Image (spheres, rainbow, N blue to C red):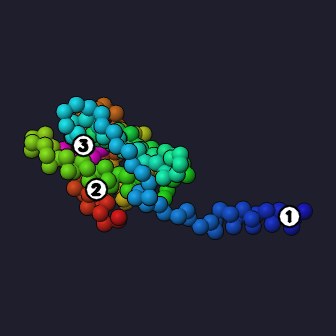
Amino acid sequence: MLTRAWTAAAALQQRFWNRTPPEPLRLRDFAKKVQFYGVHHFWYGDVRWTYETRDDPPKEVGYIQFAPDSGQIGLFFLDTPFQNRGLGKQMLAEATANIHEAQLLLPAEDRTHKVWAVTTDNHPFWSNVWGSVFRPVNPASPRVTGSGYSADLDRVLHISKETA
């Protein structure tokens, strides 16, 4: 009886402690669909990038929706099997680069120097991504009333390029 308990404990230890991490994934291995929401030019509305597998039929992996004019990350989702494998950081890096490019097209008085998201406190992604570059703030931006996370746009660009 005791031997059986020790064997079960050893199996659990091997399963959880000696587990190899999942393979990192690359964003370039997925198809990207682009949608625009809003009026005028692309930087005055939301942009939504949906990523799918290249299978037939394709399976949606995740999406990120953001507003290039304000720096807001509005919606951000990754399906569970694809989490903790580097895709979220790559999606955020691509969106941040797009926000930065859009800022260069705006008049100086309309530019933002922040990237921000309204989300829950102690969010596992936002509180840890790139060495906690995003800081909890309340409100997340002067444009909203809810709390969230915010970071300096130039710092996020620099760190995301270093870790790419």
Corner quadrant of residue 138: top left
Q: Main secondary structure of the magenta part?
A: strand
Question: Label 1: few (<14), some or many (≥20) within 10 Å?
Answer: few
The stretch drawn in magenta includes residue 41:
no
* Residue located 25% across and 35% down the image: 45
Label 2 belongs to which residue? Answer: 156
Residue at the far right in the pictured view = 1
Whole-percent x and y of residue 41?
19, 37
Q: Is residue 7 left or right of residue 134?
A: right
Q: Amino acid at mark 1?
A: Arg
Label 1 belongs to which residue? Answer: 4
Which is in the foreground here, disc 2 or disc 3? Answer: 3
Query: Mark 3 falls on what kind of element?
Result: loop
Q: Which residues are magenta?
A: 112-116
The answer to whether residue 126 is seen in the rendering is no
Q: Amino acid at mark 3?
A: Pro
Query: Mark 2 falls on what kind of element?
Result: helix
Whole-percent x and y of residue 11?
74, 65
Q: Amino acid at mark 2?
A: Val
Query: Mark 1 falls on what kind of element?
Result: helix
Q: Does 144 sit above or below residue 56?
A: above
Question: Label 2: few (<14), some or many (≥20) within 10 Å?
Answer: many
| Pointers 3 and 1 in contact (C-beta within 8 Å) | no
* Residue located 36% across and 59% down the image: 130
* Mark number displayed over residue 68: 3
